[in-house]
Image (cartoon, helix red, strand yellow):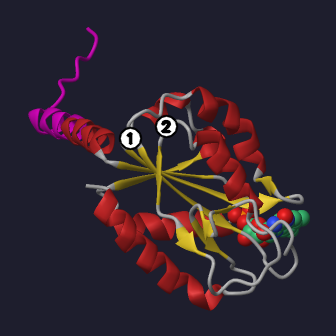
Amino acid sequence: MPLRLRQPESIKIKFTYFCTLQHTSFINMANKKIGIFYGSSTGQTEKIAEKLQQLFGEDQADLINVDIASQGDLEKYPYLILGTPTWGVGEMQDDWEDFAEILEKADLKGKKIALFGLGDQDTYPDSFADGVGILFSKISEKAKIIGKWPKKGYHFHESEALRENKFVGLILDQENQPGKTAERLAKWVEILKKEFV
Ligand SMILES: Cc1cc2nc3c(=O)[nH]c(=O)nc-3n(C[C@H](O)[C@H](O)[C@H](O)COP(=O)(O)O)c2cc1C
């Protein structure tokens, strides 16, 4: 006669509790207001994106690498923060180049979007943080862009990220000004918190 093993009640309860937890955390994720989308080739932008998530609180913001993001991911948040470093000479980071098509197709109506980017003003003074300017031009007609940032304190010749003498988003330089990053981030997040309500 085959041996029938009965599932003990305590295991059933534990399993049900586990499923409930899984379900709850899924709901919480879907309810988060801010999606931080970033691309990063050598990890610097990723670190900044993680810092941003901490500053907003993990209960408020999700972190998504554009390498694996979909159009649906982008459309589910009312507030977006998009971050790219500049690579090549004045180009967006590679994964953003690939994601740009999705970005252009996405329905961004009614969203508030803030941009940030990393660059190296000493080595690339003629294309400083251009990637952020390219990102801006892809979405500026489709959504409200917030979080402009003063150019004071940076030393460069030209940048695509400038509009009316201000950066279109927060620009950070981990090569030459790492000591200024924490303060810049904190100030920028305070500005954004007033917009993301
Ligand atoms: C090959 C190369 C090209 C770069 N081109 C630019 C550029 O045109 N403009 C700029 O501001 N920074 C440029 N940078 C600096 C990067 O944007 C900077 O190192 C950034 O922090 C890298 O971010 P990631 O680690 O997230 O990829 C370049 C760096 C490298 C190594």
Alpha carbon distance from label 1 to label 2: 7 Å
Q: Is residue 179 left or right of residue 154?
A: left
Count of all numbered marks drawn on residues in the image: 2
Q: Is residue 131 above or below residue 15?
A: below
Quadrant position of residue 85: bottom right
Residue at the spot 64% in from the left edge and 69% down from the top edge: 165
Residue at the spot 47% in from the left edge and 34% down from the top edge: 108
Q: Amino acid at mark 2?
A: Leu
The residue where tag 1 is placed is 77
Quadrant field for ligand 1? bottom right
Residue 22 locus on image (x, y percent): 28, 39
Q: Amino acid at mark 1?
A: Tyr
Tell whether circle 1 marks a residue whose Cβ is less than 8 angstroms from ligand 1: no
The residue where tag 2 is placed is 74
For mark 2, does the 10 Å Cα neighbourhood hold few (<14), some (14 to 19), or many (20 or more) residues?
Answer: many
Residue 145 locus on image (x, y percent): 49, 51
Quadrant position of residue 154: bottom right
Examine the rendering and report whether any part of residue 82 can be seen.
yes
Label 1 secondary element: loop
Residue at the spot 62% in from the left edge and 64% down from the top edge: 164
> The magenta stretch spans which residues?
1-19
Label 2 secondary element: helix
Quarter of the rendering occupied by the C terminus: bottom left
Q: Is residue 48 above or below residue 78?
A: below
Residue 137 or residue 42, whichever sits in front: 137
Residue at the spot 78% in from the left edge and 48% down from the top edge: 94
Residue 173 locus on image (x, y percent): 69, 78
Question: In the displayed image of the protein, which residue is found farthest to the bottom?
Answer: 179
